[in-house]
Amino acid sequence: MTEETRLREQLCLLAKSLYDRGLTHGSTGNISARTPDGGLLVSPTGSSFGRLDPGRLSRFDAAGQHIDGDKPTKEMPLHTAFYDTRGTAGAVVHLHSCHSVALSLLPGVDEENFLPAYTPYGIMQLGRVKLLPFFVPGDPAMGQAVRGLAGKRSAVMLANHGPVVAGKDVEAACNAIEELEATARLALITRGMGAEPLTGGQVRSVVKTFDVEWDA
């Protein structure tokens, strides 16, 4: 089995896991990963995370040309923006996860730091999450907004739409976006109940201990 074949199967397996646990639904969401030769494997447009076929994933070469597989997701500008601006990005995942979308609809959310610091793991895996405004799905302006961050954020939340996370590989990206959704769920469950987040000193301790990108 080649390294690319393993990557194709891993991408589909992780996508199905996200789908089976209700983290995205229907034909929503998209996922991509760097191939060993510098190209990309991308979920096709209109596909379901629960039924991805490893052999039909969209394949791009290192020059960004679509060379094989089905037509890619319409959110390609969003994915390529992360790859082009974050040298550490080996995979990108975008979901329509319920709790994170719900949190983006509520007033008083910090655009520069979308998630409250309720646990160290959201900080460790995501850094600060930037809340971006609403864009029509497929609008290249989403990619332009990510490029405007100059690679300083590994995760963004698209208001009224869903989260997008870049990771060093497809497993790391999936783990991080699950942490984003779990933290958003905590925020909703505890909203209005006087929940106490980590103190500024505790946050700084986590950031220092785990070398988290935080101040950008």
Image: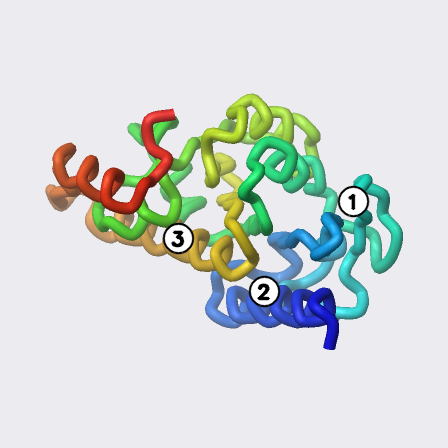
Q: Disc 3 and disc 2: Cα gap in Å? A: 15 Å
Mark 1 falls on what kind of element?
loop
Q: Which residue is mark 1?
A: 62
Specify the amino acid type for callout 2: Ala
| In this view, the mark in front (1 or 2) | 1
Foreground residue, 18 or 83?
83
Q: Residue at x 85, y 47 (%)?
A: 66
Q: Disc 1 and disc 2: Cα gap in Å? A: 23 Å
Query: In this rendering, would 138 be left or right of 150?
Result: right
Q: Which residue is mark 2?
A: 15
The quadrant of the image that shows the C terminus is top left
Query: In this rendering, would 116 be left or right of 196?
Result: right
Q: Disc 1 and disc 3: Cα gap in Å? A: 32 Å
**126, above or below 150, in the image:** below
Q: Position of residue 67 (x, y in %)?
A: 88, 52
Which one is earlier in the sequence, the residue at label 3 or at label 2? 2
Q: Residue at x 59, y 51 (%)?
A: 91
Residue lying at the far top in this picture: please name it.
148
Specify the amino acid type for callout 1: Ala
The quadrant of the image that shows the N terminus is bottom right
Mark 2 falls on what kind of element?
helix
Foreground residue, 158 or 85?
85
Q: Which residue is mark 3?
A: 181
**216, above or below 114, in the image:** above
Q: Place residue 46 in its image quadrant.
A: bottom right
Q: Residue at x 33, y 40 (%)?
A: 212
Mark 3 falls on what kind of element?
helix
**40, above or below 23, in the image:** above
